[in-house]
Amino acid sequence: MELASFVERYSRQIILREIGVKGQTKLFKSRVIVIGCGATGTAVAELLARAGVGFIRVVDRDVVELSNLHRTHLFRESDALENLPKAYSCAKRLREINSSISVEYIVDSVSADNIEKLISDVDLVIDGSDNIETRLLINEACIVLNKHWIMMGVERWYGMTKFINASKGACYQCLVSRRYRRRENVCEVIGVSNAIVSLVTSIASTLALKYLLELPVEEDLFVVDALDLTISKIKLNRNPECPACVKKEFIFLNKREGERIRYACGSNIIEVFPEKILKIDFSKLRENNSFRYIKVFDDKVAYIKIGDIDIMLLDNGKALIRNIREFSKSEDLYNNILKELNNLGAIYYL
């Protein structure tokens, strides 16, 4: 990006004493990952892209649905009608907002198998997930790799966010009881106001920018009440018995059982892995497509719909199957899809 264009684009930030050209350059050299492209994730990703953060990686395993649109930034009605993967759609909009930055999208679930690889080369991790298990996994991986991250959560009219530096203060596990009650996506179960999303993500984005600019960052827990319009800052101390940041017992990170079929963390999605290492050439489907409904995105991922069942098939053979609860049915469906692809000459075993 040319210097004149750079200065003009970010002129209203550069004139801020805390930023200047030096700070804007820091942002442009910064690398961030946003895990989850729902309401909170997309809102923070948009603000960071507009602020000029130079590299943003977005990760999500779902497709856009009409019920997402009231609270989720970046998505449009057409995205839901076309069943676009959230990560794909999010990345596309971010590039339209700021073509000078690098945006990478990954359509996949975040698990113990891939979390460390996903976050190893970034400066800051942003939590845009919708379940406690994923946050606990992020927390453990960040402790192991000495990464800082920002937690966010919203439900009804309420929300919270916190910048977490586990080497210095309380980690996420310090906040959560060992006997927490597992819940599915709270936005789908009990609802959420779009106002609380904007309030919480504005605070989270401010924390992110301050950290990337090397400014002092508050480590309090911010609790927001959109109904009463109040924001509380709560000082948290490290739990001296914390299994994660104190005892280094990484319960979630060590769940690498290598099973071929499993439930995705905190969702109604079943993950199926191929028995052998393979690569799918989705370009072959353009010439000969035997599936009734299939969409391929950048030859990296395919969305297949069979009746009420949604399948996200990655080019490494991994499948994310939604609306089936039985492992046996998922395995049969997966094997049939691979058989069709093999007949088309689209599968290469490595």
Image (cartoon, rainbow, N blue to C red):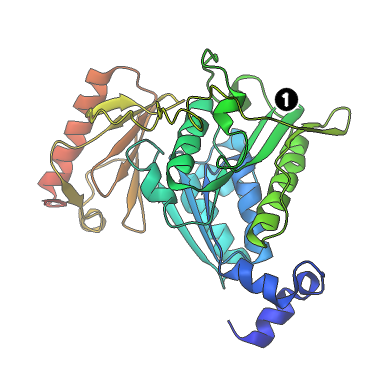
Q: Is residue 98 above or below residue 327?
A: below
Residue drawn at x 17%, y 45% as measured from the top left? 341
Q: Is residue 234 above or below residue 17?
A: above
Q: Quadrant of residue 100?
A: bottom right
Residue situated in front as seen by the camera: 209 or 3: 209
Residue type of the residue flagged with mark 1: Arg
Q: Quadrant of residue 330?
A: top left
Q: Residues within 10 Å of mark 1 (few under 14, many from 20)?
A: some
Residue drawn at x 43%, y 42% as measured from the top left? 144
Residue situated in front as seen by the camera: 229 or 169: 169
Q: Is residue 153 above or below residue 207?
A: above
Residue 4 pos. (x, y %):
68, 87
Residue 347 pos. (x, y %):
15, 49
Residue 49 pos. (x, y %):
62, 61
Q: Is residue 235 above or below residue 95?
A: above
In the image as oriented, which residue stretches furthest toward the front?
Answer: 240
Mark count: 1
Q: Tell me the residue that label 1 is attached to.
A: 156
Q: Secondary structure at mark 1?
A: loop
Is there any visible trace of residue 328 in the rendered image?
A: yes
Residue drawn at x 48%, y 30% as measured from the top left? 244
Instruction: Tell me the quadrant of the picture where the N terminus can be found.
Output: bottom right
Is there any visible trace of residue 71 in the rendered image?
A: no
Q: Quadrant of residue 197?
A: top right
In the shown orientation, is residue 338 left or right of residue 145? left
In the shown orientation, is residue 76 left or right of residue 8? left
Residue 249 pos. (x, y %):
41, 27
